[in-house]
Amino acid sequence: MKFKAMSLSLMLALATPVAMGEASVEEYRAMLADKDANPGFLIIDKGEALFKEKRGPKNASLEQCDFGLGAGKLKGAYAQLPRYFKDTKRVQDLESRLVSCMVNLQGFTEDEVKAKLYGDQRHNENNTPLEAIAAYVAYQSNGMKIDPPLKHPMEKETLKVGEAYFWNRHGPMDFSCATCHAEDGKRVRLQALVNAYNKQDIRKTMSTWPTYRVSHGVARNNQHRMWDCHWQMRTPDIDYGSPATVALISFLTHQAKGGVYDLPGIKR
Amino acid sequence: MKNRMMIAAAIAGVSMTVSAGETMQAKIEKLVAASFKPGEGQDMTRLVQDETQKLCSATRNNPPAKDADALTAREKATIKYPADNKLMGDWKEGEKLVKGGFGMRIGTIEPDPAAKQKGGNGGNCYACHAVDPKEVAAGNLGPSLTGYGKLRGQSEDMVKYTYEKLYNAQAFVACSSMPRLGHNGILKPEQIAHVTAYLLSPESPVNK
């Protein structure tokens, strides 16, 4: 016991400040990894209720929404997104598909659906319906392999354009996604950054979105992550479900192919 | 005749490389135009790429040597200096700028509040660099700057190099990851002189 305490203090004395910072971050991550304590489950439950509730001018639920495997087929659908949809004639991810269904099935206008995208963590807001429903639909693919299709020419094109956009530098900071996410072992301050070209790394990341973000107190989705990075890059707000965000998410999802969804995620 | 053929070949060579890059570049420009919506609080001019951003995007930050040389020369020509031409400012002011991460976030979702904006932008240096050895929360995208002045001294050349590197990193390294802090208007020339002093001054915690 005494030896343990001594070795610990010796360790601390020898540790560099950065290494100590990393260790405490690791400890924090370990505490977050307790799946049963993930508040994301409460948001998934709320999302389920909203998904089944009759809403909008057409007073319809989202139960007939087709996420790619057929109307109302939720199990495993998220694991095979993004994909090309015949009715909208474009490649869509979960969130942009959800907008289509809210417009087509429930009769909302796109502007109405997108009027409030995200709960504002600065004002302690709860998740928006969009965020809660996305978390619920995604969870129906928990434990399944990330397996987005790559058959339709538009799916191939979206993937290619998505990777090119990943390297696109713009804005006053001269940043692209690749500035932070194309090398192993990089950090912004103490925040570890995923390398999109490291198979293990990108699988770990993509398999845990949507995720509960402790610092926000809400569940966030891939669209929010794309917006957040662009906001930090000091660009204007990138549009929810836009061709650029869907292309990026396609690229990242294909890089993570073969990973297994572990939902809901929990992150800083 | 021989001359004309050479010119024709040269033009064909240039246009071939340009159009090969252009196809994807044109696609990306269309993608961007369809993905950001103009409106209050949005500054669409930020999405317009300059020649340097275009080249670095198309080549994934690995431009051919000839283009890289032209790029660094072009960027070097953009460097402006403080009105009094003093490149070593006040290291204490520099410290605030190195620590500060505020400024330039726009849009309608979470813009930086105007009231705080009056203090000016931070340099956001700790996002990527270790600087003061006492600051634990330093990123590692860029090299450590701890002991920067102690290692390099304060010669006139070193002061000038440091100022210019901070003002426009791509004047030295084509497609460097580092933002062109002065050229892009993130920091003013006087502020860059303060940061220069923070890195170089023997009094600065960076060199203790």
Image (spheres, coloured by chain):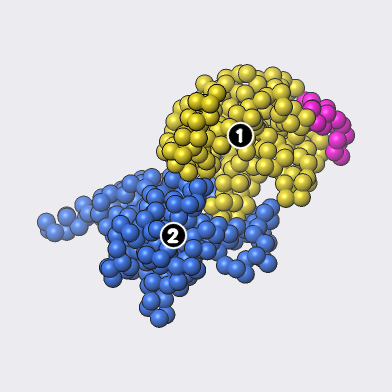
Q: Main secondary structure of the magenta part?
A: loop
Total tally of numbered discs in the picture = 2
Residue A233 vs residue B117, the one in the foreground: B117
Residue A140 x %, y %: 70, 22
Shade of chain A as shown in the rendered figure: yellow
Q: Nearer the viewer, mark 2 or mark 1?
A: 2
Residue that appears at 78% across and 45% down:
A125
Query: Residue under mark 2: which chain is it in?
Result: B
Q: Is residue A62 magenta?
A: yes
- Which chain is assigned blue? B
Residue B203: x and y, percent? 41, 65
Q: Position of residue A145 (x, y in %)?
A: 57, 19
**Quarter of the figure that contains the N terminus of chain B:** bottom left
Is residue A186 at all visible to an observer of this figure? no
Q: Nearer the viewer, residue A251 or A19?
A: A19
Viewed as shown, does residue B50 lie left or right of B120?
Answer: left
Residue labelled with disc 1 = A28
Judge left or right: residue A267 versus residue A253: right
Label 2 close to label 1 by CB (< 8 Å) = no
Q: Residues within 10 Å of mark 1 (few under 14, many from 20)?
A: few
The residue that disc 2 covers is: B205
Badge 1: chain ID: A
Q: What range of the chain is rendered magenta? A: A45-66
Q: Residues within 10 Å of mark 2 (few under 14, many from 20)?
A: some
